[in-house]
Image (tube, grey):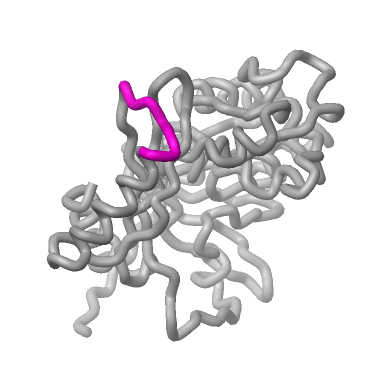
């Protein structure tokens, strides 16, 4: 591959105690915890909102929140706070309830007394904004982490890009919550990538649907027929779940590729929309 030598002096826009790269669920937790313990914290994200998978991909399930056998929480703290901020449960109730985190209607029929922590991506965005800013975190959205400068065995400077162009951030500590360990990889940390990768998925939302056992059976039959006829490739499930009312989202699309390869990722987005 041909290369281009590029040198430029960059503005130093921040020197926080902690820089959190990525504001998905892990990034939100890391940023809030650091800020509430007295650190100055900046949190950057390439999107215009926090939430990661939950808001960007469309997810309504709090995976890993409870032990599915009993429905009882196995983690708490900020998870409970977010549930209460979104109005899913009343203040102080969260630790004492049993939950059906996926909202799958088969589980709903099996455990009718369990609380389904249904929410909407827009509501989660607002709750994330509030918990970050009220904790003293400085969010910086529409900002893509692009490179790092390493001195010794530490990340000294993080290079990011946004509407100001390329900018430099010089934190005392960097937390990589990018999802793909981008910062760690660019810093030269060793990593392993499996030869066989899990396919990528694009969730999609449909309104005015009454979710029933029969509908799920029909969806599965239609999907298999489409695959057999060559109209679609891989698929999973389907796993439909309810947001609220008659709005549901489908976790079904599966596109092979490597999400750390820009071309594969782009092709997966395009093919995913076609399949949807």
| Vertical arrangement, residue 212 with respect to residue 153, above or below | above
Q: Nearer the viewer, residue 222 or 29?
A: 222
Instruction: Kindly identify the residue that appears in the image at 65 percent across and 31 percent down.
Output: 137
Q: Answer whether residue 209 is magenta in the image.
A: yes
- Where is residue 7 drawn, in percent x and y? 33, 65
Q: Residue at x 54, y 25 (%)?
A: 119
Disc tally is: 0
State whether residue 75 appears in this view: no
Q: Position of residue 35 (x, y in %)?
A: 75, 34
Classify residue 27 by image quadrant. top right
Q: Which residues are magenta?
A: 208-214
Quarter of the image containing the N terminus?
Answer: bottom left
**Residue 118 seen in this snapshot:** yes
Write the residue at 39% across / 36% down. 249
How far across and how far down the image is residue 234, in percent?
A: 29, 66
Magenta-drawn stretch, dominant element (helix, strand or loop): loop
Given residues 207 and 57, the one toward you in this image is 207
Camera-side residue of 202 and 210: 210
Whether residue 74 sits left or right of residue 228 in the image: it is right
Q: Quadrant of residue 37?
A: top right
Relative height, residue 85 to residue 1 (above, below): above
């Amino acid at each position: 591959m041909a290369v281009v030598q590029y040198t430029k002096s960059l503005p130093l826009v921040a020197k926080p105690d902690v820089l959190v790269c990525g504001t998905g669920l892990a990034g939100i937790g890391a940023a809030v915890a650091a800020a509430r313990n007295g650190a100055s914290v900046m949190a950057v994200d390439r999107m215009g909102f926090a939430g990661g998978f939950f808001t960007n991909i469309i997810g309504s399930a709090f995976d890993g929140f409870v032990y599915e056998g009993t429905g009882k929480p196995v983690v708490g703290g900020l998870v409970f706070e977010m549930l209460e901020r979104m109005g899913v449960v009343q203040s102080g109730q969260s630790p004492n309830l049993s939950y059906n985190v996926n909202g799958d209607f088969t589980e709903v029929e099996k455990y009718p007394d369990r609380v389904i922590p249904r929410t909407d991506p827009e509501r989660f965005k607002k709750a994330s904004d509030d918990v970050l800013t009220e904790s003293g975190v400085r969010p910086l959205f529409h900002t893509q982490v692009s490179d790092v400068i390493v001195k010794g065995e530490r990340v000294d400077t993080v290079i990011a890009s946004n509407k100001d162009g390329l900018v430099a951030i010089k934190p005392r500590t960097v937390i990589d919550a990018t999802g793909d360990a981008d910062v760690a990889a660019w810093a030269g940390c060793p990593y392993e990538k499996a030869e066989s990768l899990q396919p990528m998925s694009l969730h999609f939302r449909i309104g005015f649907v009454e979710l029933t056992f029969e509908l799920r059976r029909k969806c599965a039959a239609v999907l298999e027929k489409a695959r057999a006829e060559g109209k679609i490739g891989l698929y999973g499930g389907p796993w439909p779940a309810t947001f609220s009312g008659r709005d549901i989202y489908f976790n079904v699309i599966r596109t092979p590729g490597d999400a750390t390869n820009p071309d594969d990722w782009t092709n997966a987005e395009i093919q995913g929309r076609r399949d949807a």
